[in-house]
Structures are given as structure tokens and as C-alpha cells.
């Protein structure tokens, strides 16, 4: 009889494929690299009311680790940065795929980048001269001379030139200081690279599609398309080719009329889930930019969890808070919390914690969540935890007591 998974079992496969079943006893720099290889992408975002998202995503999977390990791996050229799902840290082994995509992309912001450099030759030339002379450069190395204040939407010309060259793949990020980018010319940073090694367009799409499906456990082709933000039509064709080659297989999942797809490497996970032997038992505090969270349609379909990050929503219209983190308890999204790390005061403030409608909190959820919040706060150097609001008052009192 063909295997059929329940939605609960499909969630378990996703959680396992995302390396969230367990965490190492003591994380190492190798664990950081291995985790990024498992996910294939680590999205970059600079919001840091608690900590920057890449660090939160890693902590969910490996526990306490040294933040410098991530940027060390970048400086060691074991990772690189480029546009993928969004701006991401990526395994250096995948560089050829993104070099192919950069050379082929003739639309949107790539055209804007070329046009801007053509229209601003002085800034372009100044940046290129600095990179050739010094080997690397930061935006702060260039003095602003137009008298204006800087900002995301008002960059100085040299910063804009560096970003355009980065978009085009002509410079790469070779390090970060206080999370600010350090740029170098591609030929200086990756002297061994030869464009003759670039994989074909079809090979690039097929390999990225296969990696997306592997990272998602079981997925619809459309969800696989979102993982690397690939062309939707081409992703569907890629899925068909991979099914023909048996790199991908199909499985029926409760709630879907059409079979979902999974990578052949995840066959054992599918079998364990179908037999009821794949049971997530941990509680995780997830970044809003975690791969499990970032596709809102998939999150809703698999977990019945309606989520959006509200930092871009005007304050009066926010429902859950500026930067609320989803709470994954075993295989269910049970709630979210909005927090801030006050490092100078050693205090971790939970401004609001909302349990989902229908969640009946038990002692297991209370104890697991209390333990994870205490670990999370301690890792940020803010061991004192203060909870301002919990939408379930009885649970809020029990949680606060469990954290003492």
C-alpha cells in the first residue's frame, strides 16, 4: 500500500530536515558550517532588538555558540554572501550556481545596478581604485562630501557603487566588522575561480530545486520555488526532470489532492514518519526569518499558523509586537513572543507572549518554554527575565514561577 502522511507527520519530516530534532551538547564552529549546509541558505537581516536573525536561526539549531564563528567562516571563504531567498550566507560550494544566475540576470535591480554605475562613473572609478590599491574596502573608508546624512534610502555614492558591484557579482563580501560589510574584488577574493567552471543553466536550476526539496522535507513544487526564489515556471519543469530521474519522489499527504514531493535522500525520514517513529520533542524559539517561518503560505498550510512580522507595520496597528518570535513546541506552533534584550541592564524583557487560540498549555509546555527562555536570555547576557504580558494569565503566572 502506498505511503500516506498526515499533516502532523509531514511537519515532523520538515522539522527533521531543518535540523531541529536536537542540538549538540556543546556547539563548535563546524556545527555552524554544517547547519548552513543543511539549510543551504542563512538569511541575513540587520534588525537586532534581541539579536540579528542569522544568529537566532543558528541558535535554534545548535544552542549557544560564539557569534564570531559565522563571520570567521566568511573570512575563511567557507561561506559567501549573495542574493538567494533574500540576502544570505551561502556555502562556498554553491558559488557557481549564483555566478551563473548573476551573469544571466538581465532584469530589475541588475539592470539598475549597471545603469547606476554607468551614470556615476566617478564613484565607480573611485571605488574600483580603492579596491585595487588596498585589496578590500568598507563603506566607512569613503568620506561623504555632499553634506547629507546617511541612511538606508540615502546612501553615499561610494556605498551605492559597492552595492551595485556586489549585485553584479563583481565584488564579494570577504568579512564583516560590527556586522558591516568588507568588500573585495571577485578576482582578489576568489583567485582560483574560473568562469569556465560555471554549471549550465539547467544544472543550476535542477541542483537548487533538489536542495530546496531536501531542505523542506516534503513540499509542493511552489514551496520549493520560494526557497531560493527561483523562476516558478522553470522550477516546475525542474521538478518534472528530477522526478523522471528519481532524484525526487512523491508521497500523498493529508489535505492535498495532489502528491507532494520529497528528495530521495529523505526516504528514511518519510518511512519513519509514516511508521510514527519520527516524533519531535523539543521546544524552539524561531527567528521571523527562519526557513520554517519565511513562507507564510506554507506555514499556514502545514501548521495552521497565521504569522507576519510587524516591524514594518505602524505601531498602532500591531497585534503581537515589533519583532515577535514564533514558538515551535514539538511539532506545533503554539504561540509567539515579542522581546527585547537590554544588555546594559542584564535584563531580557518579554513585552508580550501570545499563545495561539485553542492551545491548552500543560506542564510540559510550561517547563520546556521556561527552560528555553532562560537559556535564550542567558546567551544574550541578560539573565534576568521580566514578563510584562501573557494573553493566558494563568499560564503567565505559572511560566514566571517556573523561570525563578
Image (tube, rainbow, N blue to C red):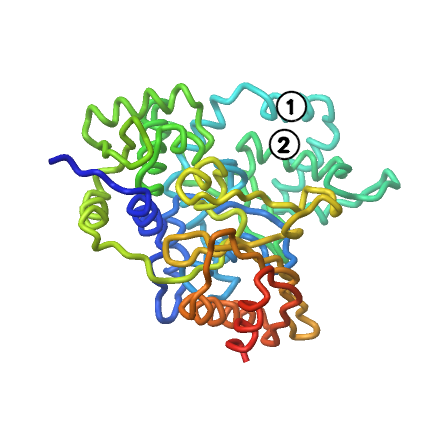
Q: Is residue 187 above or below residue 61?
A: above
Mark 1 crowdedness (10 Å alpha carbons): few <14, some 14-19, many ≥20: some
Q: Are marks 1 and 2 in contact (CB under 8 Å)?
A: yes
Tell which of 4 and 144 is nearer to you.
4
Asked if residue 352 shows in the view, the reply is yes
Q: Nearer the viewer, residue 299 or 110?
A: 299
Q: State the residue at coordinates (62%, 41%).
A: 131
Which tag, 1 or 2, sits closer to the chain's start? 1
The x, y position of residue 325, in whole percent, is 55, 54
On the picture, is 149 further left or further right than 328?
right
Tag 2, which secondary structure?
A: helix
Q: Residue furthest bottom?
A: 404
**Which of the two residues, 75 or 356, is positioned nearer the viewer here?**
356
Q: Determine the CA span between mark 1 and mark 2.
A: 8 Å
Residue placed at 74% from the left, 47% from the top? 315
In the image: residue 253, left or right of residue 227: left
On residue 164, which mark appears? 2
Q: Which mark is residue 112?
A: 1
Residue under the image location 20 percent in, 50 percent down: 272
Amino acid at each position: 500500500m502506498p505511503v500516506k502522511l498526515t499533516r502532523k507527520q509531514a511537519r515532523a519530516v520538515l522539522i527533521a530536515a531543518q535540523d531541529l530534532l536536537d542540538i549538540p551538547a556543546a556547539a563548535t564552529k563546524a556545527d555552524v558550517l554544517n547547519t548552513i549546509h543543511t539549510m543551504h541558505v542563512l538569511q541575513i537581516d540587520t534588525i537586532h532588538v534581541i539579536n540579528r536573525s542569522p544568529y537566532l536561526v543558528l541558535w535554534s539549531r545548535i544552542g549557544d555558540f560564539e557569534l564570531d564563528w559565522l563571520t570567521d567562516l566568511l573570512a575563511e571563504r567557507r561561506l559567501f554572501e549573495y542574493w538567494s531567498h533574500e540576502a544570505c550566507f551561502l556555502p562556498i560550494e554553491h558559488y557557481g550556481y549564483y555566478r551563473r544566475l548573476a551573469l544571466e540576470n538581465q532584469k530589475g535591480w541588475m539592470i539598475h545596478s549597471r545603469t547606476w554605475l554607468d551614470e556615476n562613473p566617478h564613484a565607480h572609478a573611485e571605488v574600483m581604485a580603492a579596491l585595487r590599491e588596498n585589496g578590500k574596502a568598507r563603506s566607512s573608508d569613503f568620506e561623504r562630501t555632499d553634506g547629507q546624512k546617511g541612511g538606508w534610502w540615502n546612501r553615499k555614492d561610494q556605498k551605492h557603487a559597492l552595492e551595485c558591484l556586489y549585485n553584479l557579482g563583481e565584488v564579494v563580501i570577504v568579512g564583516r566588522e560590527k556586522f558591516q560589510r568588507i568588500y573585495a574584488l571577485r578576482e582578489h577574493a576568489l583567485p582560483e575561480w574560473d568562469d569556465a567552471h560555471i554549471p549550465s543553466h539547467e544544472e543550476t536550476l535542477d541542483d537548487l530545486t533538489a536542495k530546496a526539496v531536501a531542505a523542506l522535507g516534503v513540499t509542493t513544487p511552489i514551496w520549493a520555488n520560494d526557497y531560493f526564489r527561483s523562476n516558478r515556471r522553470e522550477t516546475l519543469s525542474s521538478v518534472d526532470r528530477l522526478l523522471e530521474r528519481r532524484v525526487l519522489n512523491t508521497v500523498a499527504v493529508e489535505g492535498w489532492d495532489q502528491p507532494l514531493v520529497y528528495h530521495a535522500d529523505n526516504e528514511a525520514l518519510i518511512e519513519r514518519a509514516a511508521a510514527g517513529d519520527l516524533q519531535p520533542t523539543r521546544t524552539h524559539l524561531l527567528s521571523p526569518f527562519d526557513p520554517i517561518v519565511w513562507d507564510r503560505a506554507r506555514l499556514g498550510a502545514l501548521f495552521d499558523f497565521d504569522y507576519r512580522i510587524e516591524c514594518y507595520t505602524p505601531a498602532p496597528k500591531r497585534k503581537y509586537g515589533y519583532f515577535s518570535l514564533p514558538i515551535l513546541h514539538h511539532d506545533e506552533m503554539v504561540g509567539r513572543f515579542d522581546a527585547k534584550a537590554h544588555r546594559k541592564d542584564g535584563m531580557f524583557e518579554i513585552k508580550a507572549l501570545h499563545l495561539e487560540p485553542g492551545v491548552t498549555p500543560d506542564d510540559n509546555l510550561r517547563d520546556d518554554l521556561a527552560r528555553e527562555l532562560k537559556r535564550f536570555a542567558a546567551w544574550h547576557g541578560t539573565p534576568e527575565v521580566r514578563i510584562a504580558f501573557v494573553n493566558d494569565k494563568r499560564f503567565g503566572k505559572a511560566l514566571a514561577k517556573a523561570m525563578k
